[in-house]
Amino acid sequence: MVAAIENGTVIDHIPAQKLFAVVNLLHLDQMTSAVTIGYNLPSEGMGTKSIIKMADKFFTDEELNQLAVVCPNLTLCIIRDYDIVEKRTVALPDELRGIVRCTNPKCITNNEPMLTHFHTAGPHTLRCHYCNTLVPLDKVELVPRKS
Amino acid sequence: MEKRSLVTIADHSREKIEYLIRMAQEFERHPNRRLLEGRVVATLFFEPSTRTRLSFETAANRLGARVIGFADPKVTSGTKGETLKDTIMMVSNYADIIVMRHYLEGAARYASEIAPVPIVNAGDGANQHPSQTMLDLYTIYQTQGTLDGLDIYLVGDLKYGRTVHSMLNAMYHFGPTFHFIAPEELAMPEMYKQFCRQHGIKYVEHTDFNADVIAGADILYMTRVQRERFTDLMEYERVKDRYLLKLDMLSKARPNMKILHPLPRVNEIEYAIDDNPHAYYFQQARNGLYARQALLCDALGITLEDIINDSTIID
């Protein structure tokens, strides 16, 4: 359904509605190589899913792990010469800077031009480094991107 | 000089808390010194707080420091749109240490990360108020002779009261048993009860408040039930007087039991109790001076040994 790539990264099993969050987190709008995006594709396990194929693009662990904030069950494939050379899942990093917005409107990070900073506090919860507010992963809002 | 900001009491170990109590004892013995002569302390109050500000300024003045700052946020550049960072960076050029009260939560942590001088948190929104906690701990130690294994009863607004939350964070080192006495609307939040369970702190919850319930207390820590916290004002009217401590409720109290209150008091403690030997809230407020003298000195890198060997004592 989506053409194979020679070298690059494929992110599969993205919950359909999380596609644009992933696009934003990875700054795909700034990429110059070929990107193929499949949206609302039929999936046996998930009903519908999204998929992103990025030619000639490889990410650092840090860049990929921040995806765990929006979709903890992603599968990633690293492609070289049309072969999958590595398959991996993402893991929530211990710290997240500038990714997640604090849900507390009285938090300093929502009132001062500064980066947000969260620590993981359990498998499904983040804690704001500044105001200690706990944010469940399913309630996470991302920091809006500046254009 | 090492930069030693104070953002939250949760950053402190048991040993550090005991060390600061030792320091405060020295200041209680001799509060007037020239230990901070030549230093400038800035008190930046982005939110008004008369008691805390006067206490910090007195602490600085009695140690010989000069004090600059503002008590009214309307006079600051913040109202012109200046960021907190800019204000902090500007004041850092003038002062050796900044005592800051801010209405935003996390402001103190942020200021401590950007400022080249130590920051002492004098309250950041509903988040932390470590100098209040320190004076509470000092008072508990002073009245009970120990911090270990005490029965501490917290009464009133346990949902929003940051002083009671900080108390849990600080006391967990000392194996206390807590009793939470509050209306259901203002009960201790689950997050803090979870903290107690994780750290093996025993706690009991009550909604009744009478002589039998408080008979086992070493410390009775009263807080104000605030009208503005209630969504249902009928509920407020129903519970507001239920948490008023009356003189006859002290009939079964332990002899060592002391009543604390962070003040201001409105309708939580009957005035007739003020002269009762169990009442200790005014002495508690005075301890704020000694505790804050200790916190200012510690943040400026002055050690307990320096204070014990201090040759600048005035009185």
Image (cartoon, rainbow, N blue to C red):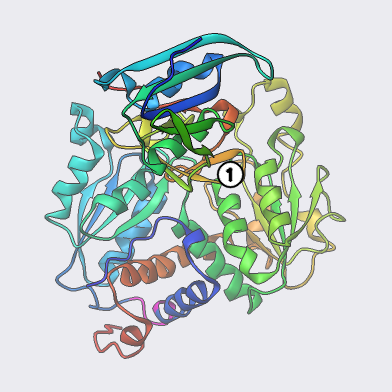
In percent of the image, x 69 and y 36: which residue is there?
B186
For label 1, the crowd category at 10 Å Cα-Cα, with few meaning under 14, some 14 to 19 and many 20 or more, is some
Indicate whether B110 appears above or below B225.
Answer: below
In terms of depth relative to the viewer, which is nearer, B278 or B132?
B132
Per the image, the residue denoted by label 1 is B161
Residue drawn at 62 percent across, 47 percent down: B223
The N terminus of chain B sits in image quarter:
bottom left
The segment highlighted magenta reads B27-31
Residue drawn at point x = 49 percent, y = 18 percent: A51
Residue at position x 35%, y 39% in the image: B47
Residue B53 visible, this angle: yes
Q: Quadrant of residue B26?
A: bottom left
Disc 1 residue type (three-letter): Gly
Q: Position of residue A121 (x, y in %)?
A: 57, 46
**Secondary-structure class at tag 1:** loop
Residue B269 seen anywhere in this rendered image of the structure:
no
Q: Is residue A9 magenta?
A: no
Residue B55 higher or lower than B22, as above or below:
above
Which quadrant of the figure has residue A137? top right
Q: Position of residue B101 (x, y in %)?
A: 35, 46
Q: Main secondary structure of the magenta part?
A: helix
Q: Is residue B28 magenta-colored?
A: yes
**Is B157 on the left or on the right of A77, as rendered?**
right
Q: How many marks?
A: 1
**Which quarter of the figure has residue B254?**
bottom right
| Front-lying residue, B127 or B270 | B127
- Is A116 displayed left or right of B254 in the figure? left
Tell me the subunit letter for badge 1: B
Residue B8 vertical placement versus B236 (above, below): below
Q: Position of residue B213 (x, y in %)?
A: 84, 54
Residue B58 point in image, percent of width and height: 32, 62
